[in-house]
Each structure stands twice: as structure tokens, then as C-alpha cells.
Image: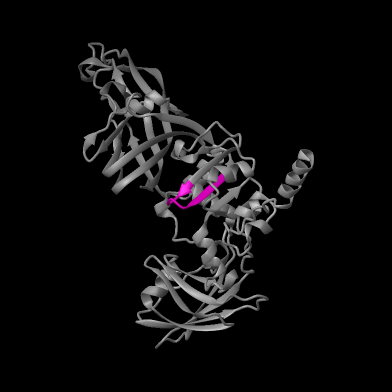
Amino acid sequence: MKYLICVFLIWSCGKNEMPKKVDLRDSDGDGTTNNYEMTEIERYTADIAPIENVKLEMRIKLANSISTELRINMSNQIDVTKLSREFLVKNPKHLPIDEYFSEWSKLKIDSEKIPVLPEQISFRVDLFFSQMNSHPDKLILVSPSGRKELGDWSQMISLLLSKNELEDILKGESFLTLSRRIKQYQGLDESQEESIKNKTYRVFLNDGVTTKIYYVAKDFSFSDFLKAKKITRYQPISTQNLLRGRYLITTPEWWLNEINGKDKVIIKDDLNSLSKFYLQGLEKSRLSVVRTNGFLVKSAVLTNDGEALILLKLRVTKQLKNFKLRSEKSSFSEGGGGRNPNGGGESPKSCINYYRDVISEEKFNLTEQELRNSMVVTSNGEQVSLSASDIEIESGRDELGFFFDIALRTVNTTLELKLKDLDQSSFMEVGLYQTTCQGTKLRKNLLNSESFMDLAIEAYVDKL
């Protein structure tokens, strides 16, 4: 009997087994609940179809002008690989205003020449879109001050923009973007874009071959996302000084960065390549410092009103003279050429003229120590120490030849670069510098053994 009771209880427990828990959340906001998404990546990364390729022509109407309109080509085409590299290495303050989905909804200018707008308070702007299979629903203006809905999308859209609004679009300080008003599941009055934006963060992943953009659920940490992508070894790019311009490390590694506390980017690349890309995006100016015949004839001034990192890439040209000593025999007569008693003039006496001639010139490379000894740098009038313990100087070679790199951090600074005048002992008397011939005038010049020294400087500035 006890045996039958036990069997009954076991059977009863089996019949009342709790149902499996179903995850009805939509962690990534894409409208599909987690239980319908099979893998971890699917559950926590939004499945969203981008807007198709868009091309359009902007026609700007002009008042009181012979030309009635200006035409500009635009599209939503974007180089996401370049964008990911910019997000990795650029100063966030230098990045254009951006937002979710702008990688396929932002309209950028494709025309090479950007027109200058005439004096006009406002402009009528017509947008003519090419044929689309699945069109967006809204046109929005995104500016530093926020978003402004301009109206519903149609094949041709007419707008009235102020001169400032239009100029900001042409300069890239504002942009037009497209949006779709797709209703969210369960009848919520929220677009799919808004749902994803509220529930996710954006990740740019560039593996060195392809670049993909993911919208990752906020409850799925970035470290968990990297593990799911089998990325286990990586370093923050902030640990590297890309301003130094030259790296021996050419092995690709994973580097990551966070942009303005929201977007994240991780790229597999080598530091040499990343440094070159970073330098291309900085403010660049060319300067030169020249010393001729031992004396400074040209200095270089670099003014920075704020706080900045500055890289000075110096290419030095130094040319030295080669001298040759020679002597020529000659003669002179004493007593002004008077006659002797036998009616002849006084016998001439032998003498020697000594010459120093420039016979050739050669170019020489400077050592790092010679550069430190030759150069003078002042900051706001105060001399900067160039000792090895105070400033690091790197040397390298590229397709243009040998160079030196000097990296400086400056705040409200006027930098001046000079070359020291050479010591008097380095000058030579050239020409007829000595003679034993009475009455012969010396014909000599003081020349330095250095013909000239030129510092060709490329200055790269990254304002903080």
C-alpha cells in the first residue's frame, strides 16, 4: 500500500510540473521578443533594415540673380570603415554631430564645389529624390541645437530655410536625415528607430577587412558582446600617443574607444596605420627656419589660443663647405722700383700669396644631439629646455627621407623656433688671406664652414 501511495505521489508531481519560463522581453527594441531569437547575439543586437541607397539633387532658388538656382548632389552613401577609424582616433570634439542610424539615414553632400550663398534672408530649397523601392516617411534637420521635423517625405520636397540653416548644412555643421515611422509591436505608438535608440548602444566593429555596426541591448554589457564575438584581447586606444607619428609595431591588434559616453568602436589594425590616419585629420601647417652663413635669417612662429597637442616633424638640410689651401709665388721690388748705379732697376724679391678657396659643398645629416644643440624654442618668450630629460625627440625615415619628431603639449602658447648663430671660431678667411709680398692688398671674406641650414617643419595640431 505504501508503495502504491509513493507511485501516485511521483505521478502527481510529474503532472503538475511548472511550465518553462518564456522570455517575453524585447531587449534590443527591434520588435521581436527574446524567445523568438535563437542565439545570444540575435537576442541582444537589433535586427533593423537600413534605408536603401538614396540619391537626390538639392536646388537652391536665388532671388534677383542671373542664375536662377544652385544645384548640389546629395546621397546617404557613407564610408563606414573610414567613419569607424575616425571614431577610434579623433578627438570627440572634432567629430561632426551624429546620432543613431545616421550611417544610413544621413544625407551628405557629394558635389565637390560648395557654392557661396548670396545675401538673402531665406532660400526656397527643392529636393528631388531618385526612385526608391521602399521610401522613408520623414525628413528631419539635425543641428547642434537639436532636431527639427521638416515634414513628410515625398519624391519632391520644397523647404524654406534661413540663410544660416542652409549655410550650416553646406558646411556640414548641420545635416538632413531620413526617418521611418514604423509602429512598434503591441500597439505602442513608437517607431522602431525610437525603440532601438532607447534600448541599445551602438558598436562599430572593424576586423580589418569589413566594418559592421551593431545596436546592442543596454542589458548586454560591452564586455559580454566582445566575448560573444570571440574578441578576448584588446587595449584602449587612449593608452597610445598617436601624435608621435612613427611606430615600429606593425602587427594588427584589437583597439577600442568609447565616444562621448555612448558609442563604442573596436578595430583590428596596427599602430603605424592608425597613427598615419590620425595625422591626416589634424590641422597642418608648413614652416621653415633658416640659417645662412652662420646667422639666423628666418625663424618660425606657431600660435595656439587654446590647449593643444602639437607634433613638429622636422626635416633638416645642412650644407657644409670644403676648403682648399693654395699658394702662388710672386715678386715685388723694394724702394718703389728705383734704378741701381749701373742704370738697371732694383732686383725683384720673391714672395708668396696664400689663398683659401671653396672647392665644393656637401649635405650632411644632423644627429639628434646636434639638433638639440642648434635649435632654440621659446614659449611665450621663455626658452624651453631641449635636454633629453625634458623633451623626447624621435627620429625616423619615410618616403621623403630622414626626419625628427618632437611632440609638445601647449596651453595658450606662442611658440617660436630659431637656430643659434654660430660661434666666431667657425668662420674662415676665404680668398687672398695672407701674403709676404709687400704692397699687395689682401682680398678676403669671412665665410662660415656651414653654407646654410634649413629646418622644414610640418606642424600638426590637435586642439583638445
User: In the figure, residue 439 lies in which quadrant?
Assistant: top left
Q: Could you tell whether 295 is left or right of 202 in the image?
A: left
Q: Nearer the viewer, residue 186 or 194?
A: 186
Name the spot of residue 198 as percent of width and height, x first: 49, 61
Q: With respect to residue 82, does 107 lie above or below?
A: below
Q: Could you tell whether 54 is left or right of 145 in the image?
A: right
Q: Is residue 101 visible?
A: no
Number of residue marks: 0
Name the spot of residue 267 as percent of width and height, x first: 57, 44
Name the outermost residue toward the bottom.
64
Q: Nearer the viewer, residue 26 or 334?
A: 26
The residue sitting at 41% across, 26% down in the picture is 368
Q: Main secondary structure of the magenta part?
A: strand
Q: Nearer the viewer, residue 437 or 65?
A: 65
Q: Is residue 287 visible?
A: yes
- The segment highlighted magenta reads 258-267
Name the spot of residue 234 as percent of width and height, x first: 55, 37
The residue sitting at 53% across, 76% down in the picture is 138
Magenta region includes residue 102: no
Q: With respect to residue 361, does 82 lie above or below?
A: below
Q: Could you tell whether 365 is left or right of 203 in the image?
A: left
- Quarter of the picture containing the N terminus is top right
Q: Nearer the viewer, residue 391 or 455?
A: 391
The residue sitting at 38% across, 32% down in the picture is 451
